[in-house]
């Protein structure tokens, strides 16, 4: 029987329910207990013969003469239910068989007992249809072999794959544990604008749209309110953070998406060294709360992190290393990033066979491409420090070396898993650096930052020494060992 023929058959069953004056999609349920509740106190319910009402989707259907066994699932667990003709009557029993299918969501009431096979079971005294399904559940979910199909019908992927369901439960714990960690340390959770007239806080290409009411073009934010949260430092808040969605109109890969969740915090009267200590505590806390361990292993040819050929293991509970950006690049490529020029870096990229955007290349983009080549064998955990000023327009210069900034970047599995720095609070230096970024943008670098004069004006009122930090859901995907698209419940898909 074809899918459409099955659908037509079920539509006829829908009419049978309505002809019997039964609403196949009621808004209210009389459920008294979840399946988890019943299983948790089963002995007590069995001894008392108490009438219980549970609800759930029928996942299996087995009829034997005047008896029918069903498996019902409600999201908290699965339980066998039993319908007997001698109990409900012949007409009611036959009507049930004529209108109910696997996939339907029903409500059943009755008392529980244990079968001879020691199966916890509820015997149905009464039942109601809660949602009649019009298409059958797949006998086997073949979407496991086709990622696009799984993402398009993620509801089936979760329904049939316990590992996928558990992944999203872990994702929820991941962000909850991060929020709790910051709450407990006095950080105030805030919400900052998603629509902006000027993007800032990151090097990325934004999405642009039109605001009809104001008749202006606006951008979807590319950072989690970095420049807005710094304004709150000016305002006098000592600690703030935001967990929210950001948007970057860039390429897709196992590590990159166009819209994803990120956390950013800002901490007044703290510097990047204070931030490094806090981040070690944060990552260990989140890993333990989410995964129950601090030790992780990515298999060979992993699709997450920078590693592609070898297995990668790291322990967040171990001592964290510090990687010196300038020294590391010099060791691996012979290039001194503080003494070289664009031609020298491009020549080295060509020699190494590293692809990069030559059309809009500048020293920042070329060095970044060179760094991505070098980072792949850094297992971590550790912090990348001593980054050149030209790579970080929002970070404070080191006092003992004005060519580098007080920045730290978490390194795990050959990739960056969060970035923070002592925030630049010198408005004169900030204006000069953003003006340089604006020149790069006008020259064709669409990822260069826009100049935000309102933000610079806020800095002129005085911002205290501040440590800022941001981390995206990439960290979750690496710890979970899945590509970032797999770690999102409903990743964006091209329409069929």
Image (tube, rainbow, N blue to C red):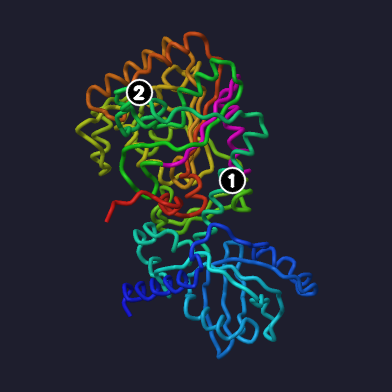
- Tell whether label 1 touches label 2 (CB within 8 Å): no
Q: In this view, does 493 lie above or below 29?
A: above
**Res 341 quadrant in image:** top left
Q: In this view, does 394 lie above or below 174?
A: above
Residue 315 coordinates in the image, percent (x, y): 58, 49
Front-lying residue, 121 or 220: 121
At label 2, counting other C-alpha atoms closer than 10 Å, the crowd grade (few under 14, some 14-19, many 20 or more) is: few
> Please, what secondary structure does the residue beneath circle 2 have?
loop
Q: Is residue 86 above or below residue 367?
A: below
In the picture, measured across the screen, residue 202 lies left or right of residue 340, that is right
> Which residue is depicted at the point 51% across and 44% down?
380
Q: Give the range drawn in magenta.
A: 260-286
- Identify the residue under disc 2: 197
Q: Label 2 to label 1, Cα distance in Å?
A: 39 Å
Which tag, 2 or 1, sits closer to the chain's start? 2
Q: Quadrant for the N terminus, please.
A: bottom left
> Please, what secondary structure does the residue beneath circle 1 have?
loop
> Which residue is depicted at the point 46% across and 45% down?
474
Q: Give the number of marks.
A: 2
* In the image, residue 271 lies in the stretch drawn in magenta: yes
Numbered label attached to residue 316: 1
Residue 143 coordinates in the image, percent (x, y): 38, 66
* In the image, residue 443 lies in the stretch drawn in magenta: no
């Amino acid at each position: 029987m074809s899918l459409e023929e099955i659908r037509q058959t079920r539509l006829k069953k829908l009419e049978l329910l309505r002809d019997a004056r039964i609403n196949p999609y009621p808004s209210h349920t009389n459920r008294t207990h979840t399946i988890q509740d019943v299983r948790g106190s089963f002995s007590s319910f069995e001894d008392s013969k108490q009438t219980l009402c549970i609800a759930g989707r029928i996942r299996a259907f087995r009829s034997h003469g005047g008896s029918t066994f069903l498996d019902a699932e409600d999201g908290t667990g699965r339980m066998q239910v039993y319908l007997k003709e001698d109990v409900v009557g012949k007409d009611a029993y036959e009507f049930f068989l004529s209108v109910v299918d696997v996939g339907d969501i029903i409500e059943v009431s009755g008392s529980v007992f244990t079968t001879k096979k020691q199966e916890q079971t509820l015997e149905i005294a009464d039942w109601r249809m809660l949602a009649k399904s019009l298409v059958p559940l797949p006998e086997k979910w073949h979407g496991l072999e086709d990622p696009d199909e799984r993402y398009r019908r993620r509801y089936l992927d979760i329904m049939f794959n316990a590992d996928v369901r558990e992944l999203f439960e872990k994702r929820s714990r991941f962000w909850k544990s991060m929020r709790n960690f910051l709450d407990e340390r006095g950080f105030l959770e805030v919400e900052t604008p998603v629509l902006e007239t000027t993007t800032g806080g990151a090097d990325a290409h934004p999405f642009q749209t039109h605001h009809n009411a104001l008749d202006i073009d606006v951008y979807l934010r590319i950072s989690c309110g970095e420049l807005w949260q710094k304004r709150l430092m000016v305002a006098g808040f000592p600690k703030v953070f935001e967990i929210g969605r950001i948007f970057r109109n860039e390429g897709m890969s196992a590590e990159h998406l166009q819209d994803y969740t990120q956390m950013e915090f800002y901490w007044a009267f703290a510097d990047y060294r204070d931030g490094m200590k806090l981040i070690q505590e944060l990552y260990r806390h989140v890993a333990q709360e989410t995964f129950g361990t601090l030790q992780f292993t990515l298999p060979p040819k992993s699709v997450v992190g920078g590693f592609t050929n070898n297995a990668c293991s790291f322990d967040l509970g171990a001592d964290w290393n510090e990687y010196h950006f300038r020294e590391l690049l010099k060791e691996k490529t012979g290039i001194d990033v503080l003494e070289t020029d664009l031609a020298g870096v491009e020549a080295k990229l060509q020699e190494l066979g590293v692809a990069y955007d030559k059309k809009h290349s500048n020293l920042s983009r070329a060095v970044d491409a060179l760094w991505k080549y070098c980072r792949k064998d850094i297992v971590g955990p550790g912090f990348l420090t001593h980054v050149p000023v030209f790579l970080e327009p929002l970070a404070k210069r080191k006092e003992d070396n004005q060519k580098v900034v007080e920045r730290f970047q978490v390194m795990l599995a050959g990739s960056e898993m969060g970035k923070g720095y002592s925030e630049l609070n010198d408005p004169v230096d900030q204006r000069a650096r953003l003006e340089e970024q604006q020149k790069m943008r006008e020259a064709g670098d669409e990822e260069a930052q826009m100049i935000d004069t309102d933000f610079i004006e806020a800095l002129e009122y005085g911002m205290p020494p501040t440590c800022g930090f941001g981390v995206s859901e990439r960290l979750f995907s690496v710890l979970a060992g899945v590509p970032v698209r797999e770690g999102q419940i409903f990743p964006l898909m091209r329409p069929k």
